[in-house]
Amino acid sequence: MTIRQLSETLINQIAAGEVIERPASATKELIENAIDAGASRIEIATAGGGKTLLRVSDNGSGMSPGDLALAVRRHCTSKIDHSLDDVRTLGFRGEALPSIGSVAKLSIQSRTADAREGSEIAVVGGRVEPVRPTPANRGTVVEVRDLFFATPARLKFMKSEKAEAAAITEVVRRMAIAFPAVRFVLSGPDRSTLELPATGSDRLARIAQVLGKDFRDNAIEIDAEREGVRLTGFAGVPTFNRGNSLQQFAFVNGRPVQDKLIWSALRGAYAETVPSGRYPVAVLEIAIDPELVDVNVHPAKSDVRFRDPGLVRGLIIGAIRQALTREGDRAATSGAAGLMRAFRPETARPSQPWSPSTSPYRPLADQPALNGFSEIRQAGFDQAGFDMGIQPSARAEPIPTMAPTATEAEPQRHPLGAARAQLHENYIVAQTEDGLVIVDQHAAHERLVFEAMRTALHAHPIPAQALLIPEIVDLPEDDCDRLVAHAEAFARLGLGIERFGPGAVAVRETPAMLGEMDAAGLVRQLADELAEWDTANGLASRLDYLAATMACHGSVRSGRRMRPEEMNALLRQMETTPGSGQCNHGRPTYIELKLADIERLFGRS
């Protein structure tokens, strides 16, 4: 078989198969070029989900006629010179424009600040037309029509126009979060206009534009640094979570990435706080020396490789957990919003229509004169005058609600306030200085017991049980080396392993609290974790899971009546325990309602 040189057009079409996967890919590349050109305003227009039309306009530095002619040739770029060790721009390969031009109808208009007129060049299916003068504003306008018309087979793999338009919107959202000083406008006949004004250095304001103001109210600021790697951004409180990962954003030196190491670290940081199947909301920015990260590992530049992945993973987990410990126990505002909606008259659904004949209340003129709280109780009313017959169980053991004395008023100044009542033997109602808090007593105590057990577990070496016959686990030699290197850490968790020849390890002890277990399966899981992440948290996670199960069965059960002093003690302990804002399954342990919200319900504000 004879080897021959492929044509330039075919080479570009092959490259387009990797670089330009769909209209959203082309959008990303063109926006990156605009940002690299110093644009402060970027406008994107689409039609047909980007397949019919994709236009990106910017007010950047623009290009001269000579630069314009080179821009549509492969591997021509102004962003790198001789090395990939110090990439500080979003683009650097010089492949995007020639790849797009090889499969679509591409035209570029551009003008520099000092030029009297602009220039234009067109590329149709890989055929480059000469540069010609044209009227143009400062900056660049790139117009792509009939994407993939030159490769019809690719069109069969495109999704619907609506799906492709949504993918473009997601690209713009991510780029907007990464560059808050840039104004973005996304419009077209296939969508409603999305306008994101520039917010300067206020990253949280831009995030609120994209994710909604709820994120601003439920975000915790992250700012940590370790060995020259800095992590900044915002993470949502654990109870502010979503059903998918679309509201998780990560950036490395300003570059939006979809990196599995970062997502794994994010999951690890929220372990035991977010329920299974739910995802935390977070925006993370990693600033690192360009020489310590490789951005040239994926055609779309959405993946990166860190020289020290363990350092980055540890920084993310440690910084987020520290932030959650500092202030992540507050209730998500979404819980209060749901409570407000439930109380609104238009959403309430009474069990039966109200009428004077069915009402348990009587006009004051028809009631006998009652003197003192004891007489009120005898008449079937509590101290507030509510009919005790509505909730018979409350009559058996009423909780005192007398006016607080000087010593009783003191707990109100605590974040979770002072207990005032217990409803349905499961919910504690506490009064704070500016509202009220409703606590799920079982979920709250479950978290407190779990944290106490986990602290006890990790404060001392885990008791181990020796195997009568050591279990030999055959593994590749590299896996054996990594496991033995972590043998000391495993021993503290009750797992005793040692080398058994070149391609095996011997398991001599397992954690006693796990009982009978698949030791070989555990060791293989730990080996896989070490190979991929250079960490082995599987054993610790199993121990934590067992502690969580024991805590669930050993905590205050729903339906138990609690005395006022017990309820207040629970509130005080919640305030000093990390992670007490959610139970072991990730559900919120309390909901806070401000006095202003209550007044709005009654139309008093």
Image (cartoon, rainbow, N blue to C red):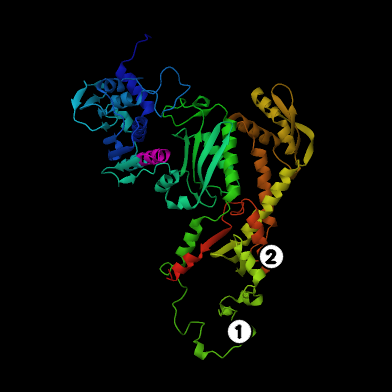
Type of the residue with mark 2: Glu
Type of secondary structure dominating the magenta stretch: helix
Measured from the top left, where is residue 421 in percent x and y? 61, 70
Question: Is 502 on the left-hand or right-hand side of 169?
Answer: right
Q: Which residue is mark 2?
A: 566
Q: Residue at x 67, y 39 (%)?
A: 539
Position in image of residue 179 (x %, y %): 40, 38
Residue 175 among those drawn in magenta = yes
> Quadrant location of residue 464?
top right
Q: Residue furthest top?
A: 2
* Mark 1 residue type: Ile
Residue 411 in view here: yes
Bounds of the magenta segment: 168-182
Q: Are marks 1 and 2 in contact (CB under 8 Å)?
A: no
Label 1 packing within 10 angstroms: few (<14), some (14-19), many (20+): some
334 on left or right of 145: right
- Counting from the top left corner in percent of width and height, residue 530 is at 62, 31
Q: Verify whether residue 256 appears in magenta.
A: no
Question: Quick check: 330 above or below 459?
Answer: below
Q: Residue 191: where, in percent of width, then height?
A: 30, 45
- Relative to 512, does residue 396 appear above or below in the rendering? below
Q: Is residue 157 visible?
A: no
Q: Where is mark 1, residue-wise?
A: 376
Which callout, 1 or 2, points at the residue further toward the start of the chain? 1
